[in-house]
Image (cartoon, rainbow, N blue to C red):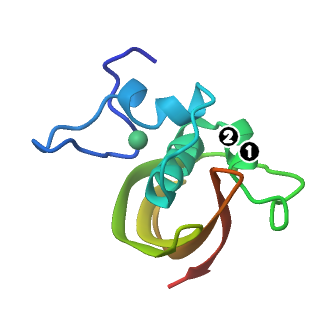
Amino acid sequence: MTELTPCPCGRADARGQGLAFDACCGRYLDHDTPAPDAESLMRSRYSAFVLGRTDHLSASWHPSTRHADLDLEPGVKWLGLEVKRHRVIDADHAEVEFVARSRTGGRGHRLHETSRFVREGGRWFYLDGDLK
Ligand SMILES: [Zn+2]
């Protein structure tokens, strides 16, 4: 990925311009920078799905709920992410509601989930989620 590759998560800056991967989720995937909030972590996990980065999916998943075998479904093309709501519950708990669109073998799929996140030792982790 080059510096100017748009971030898969689609986050835009204040002027509505899509952020580059290096200025967005790349900081959390390629460097050991902790995501500053649950939404940023959630976005970086979406980007990790797009890029097939199971290392990041695993590292950002809380050990109590993490799947031991993290296999990405082959042939999924991720089309876009829309973050609908970022609810801060307290300093160490937050929820993010999102819609992620994908396509598998010509069939469109829409994943609508409210994910729960916890912060431990200064790092946010994905805990679990409810499908809508
Ligand atoms: Zn991003």
Residue 107 spot, x, y in % from top left: 48, 62
Q: In this view, does 82 lie above or below 11?
A: below
- The vertical placement of 8 against 99, above or below, is above
Q: Given the current orientation, which residue lies at the most extreme right position?
A: 68
Residue tagged by mark 2? 56
- Residue 127 appears in the figure: yes
Which residue is depicted at the point 56% across and 81% down?
131
Amino acid at pointer 1: Ala
| Towards the viewer: 49 or 28 | 28
Q: Which type of secondary structure does the marked residue at label 1 adopt?
A: helix
Q: Can residue 106 be seen in this view?
A: no
Residue occupied by mark 1: 59
Q: Which residue is drawn at 39% across and 35% down?
A: 24
Tell me how many marks there are.
Answer: 2
State the image coordinates of residue 36 (x, y, percent, origin top left). Answer: 48, 48
**Amino acid on which the number 2 mark rests in the picture:** His
Label 1 CB, ligand 1: below 8 Å? Answer: no
Q: Give percent across and percent down for residue 124.
A: 62, 55
Image quarter of residue 5:
top left
**Residue that protrudes farthest toward the bottom in the picture:** 132
Are the two marked residues, 1 and 2, in contact with CB atoms closer than 8 angstroms? Answer: yes
The structure residue drawn at horizontal position 9% and vertical position 41%, both measured from the top left corner, is: 15
Q: Find residue 1 and name its label.
A: none
